[in-house]
Image (cartoon, helix red, strand yellow):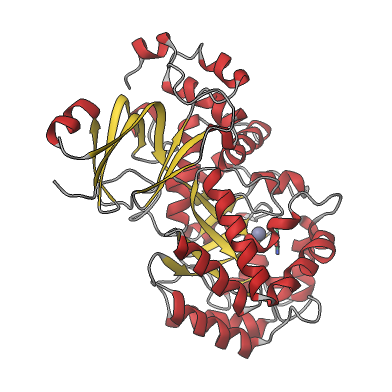
Amino acid sequence: MSEHSTLVIGQVLDIRSNPFDTPPDDAARYSRRGCVHIENGRIVDVGEADALRAAHPHARIDDHGDGLILPGFVDAHAHYPQTAIIASWGKRLIDWLNSYTFPEEMRFADPDYAGEIAARHLDLLVSYGTTSVASFCTIHAASVTAFFEAAAARNMAVVAGRTCMDRNAPDGLRDNAKTAYDESKTLLETWHGRGRAIYAITPRFSPTSTPEQLEALGGLWADHPDCPMQTHLSEQTDEVEWVRELYPHRRDYLDTYESHGLLREGAMFGHAIWLTDSERARLREHGAALVHCPTSNTFIGSGLFDTARAEAEGLRVGLATDTGGGSSFSMLHTMASAYEIGQLTGTALHPAQLLWLATAGSAEAMRLQARIGSLAHGSDADLVVLDLASTPAIAQRHSRAETIWEAVFPTIMMGDDRAVAAVYIAGARHDTGDRGGGGHNRPVSPIIADSLGL
Ligand code: GUN
Ligand code: ZN
């Protein structure tokens, strides 16, 4: 027996291939009484609880009863410095940045404030079942250091980078091409690959970078090709028009990145709503990822991202909160919002597709699919355990469910942090506690108990 061997028991839902390409029931493996076997922080096996218990009689047992065990949620685009300004009223993108975001981001010159908000952000994410995030920081090196330190203290795999801006931002939030390059490089060399930290080269977006800055960051990326690159693309129509004015010689918004070495696999483009056919084709050819931020897109009034179309075209898609433009820290709420936007764009996304986007899809967008976002053998043991009857409203709908998809969908649509019974980060359990919802060991509906089995 290994002293670090744990059997995490409950219902287990393992979505093993992309359910946009494979029918959900073929893509997923479900076990009513399943088990994830963890050793030394990694997943070594997934199977039936009885069999794994018999095979590992000395392992520690964490029995979650009817709790649903999934890979921890992966948020592929967030702004931790905007934690305290989430739900700020009444603006669209550019006004929202100037009125709320930039004044708040100024405060991150103070390492103590950055540390406080980084800790708050990550603790909120864990309480919602999110175990990894790709976050923008601010222009201040201290904001990056604070975030990676807070993530290391929780042993979380995070992607983050210094947000570079050298125009159209206020005094105190602007750098230049050289300082952006130099400071990003120093931070990258300090943090990339240290523990579970991944450094992302991070130009905020083309309106706040000169061509010289994009060129410098493209050069840095060429020197460090295994890092991801994160930015924003075509979120609002006014922004697209502004980019056209700022870059009159570029054929479209994507070209402002492409022509400076910022389009290839490992690029993560947040939003990407208002794309031309040519942009879509080039994003696909280069293997770049689009990151869908549904609560942000409705909250700031940006538009409707067509997930089903992007997947059908073979584009890589991740899912994200985009806090504080997004209105929730919760990936459950984000899946619900993606479902609603799907309805408005003509496709009811299947629960398997929503769950896949919030785990493996986001992990693939971050190029971390070998380590997070699934229950595959060898993955880091980042797990979330959901109570599928966490509130009276959810419980009464859940009691009618006849399949695992019907059982989980009410929690996707109506669940919040009360649905998160436990979280595992690299095998270490974080109890998220019963917040007075429905009780975590509520029996599964008898109909489900009898009729499941995919
Ligand atoms: N575009 C450039 N910066 C931002 C940001 O902070 N949030 C959102 N939603 N869009 C952006
Ligand atoms: Zn963003």
Q: Is residue 202 visible?
A: no
- Where in the figure is residue 161, as x and y percent of width and height? 55, 71
Q: Quadrant of residue 203?
A: bottom right
Give the image location of residue 193, x and y in percent.
38, 71
Figure disc tally: 0
Q: Residue at x 59, y 28 (%)?
A: 436
Q: Quadrant of the C terminus?
A: top left
**Compared with residue 380, is residue 129 higher up or lower down, i.e. above or below?**
above
Taking depth in this image into account, of 105 and 337 the one nearest to the observer is: 105
Q: Is residue 23 left or right of residue 143?
A: left
Q: Is residue 281 above or below residue 406?
A: below
Q: Position of residue 124 (x, y in %)?
A: 59, 49
Image quarter of residue 12: top left
Q: Quick check: which quadrant has ligand 2?
A: bottom right
Instruction: Please tell me which residue is depicted at 42% across the width and 28% down the height of the picture.
Output: 67
Is residue 146 in sight in this rendering?
yes
Residue nearest the viewer, comparing 296 with 395: 395
Q: Position of residue 224 (x, y in %)?
A: 43, 79
Residue occupying image coordinates x 48% and y 61%: 158
Q: Is residue 324 left or right of residue 195?
A: right
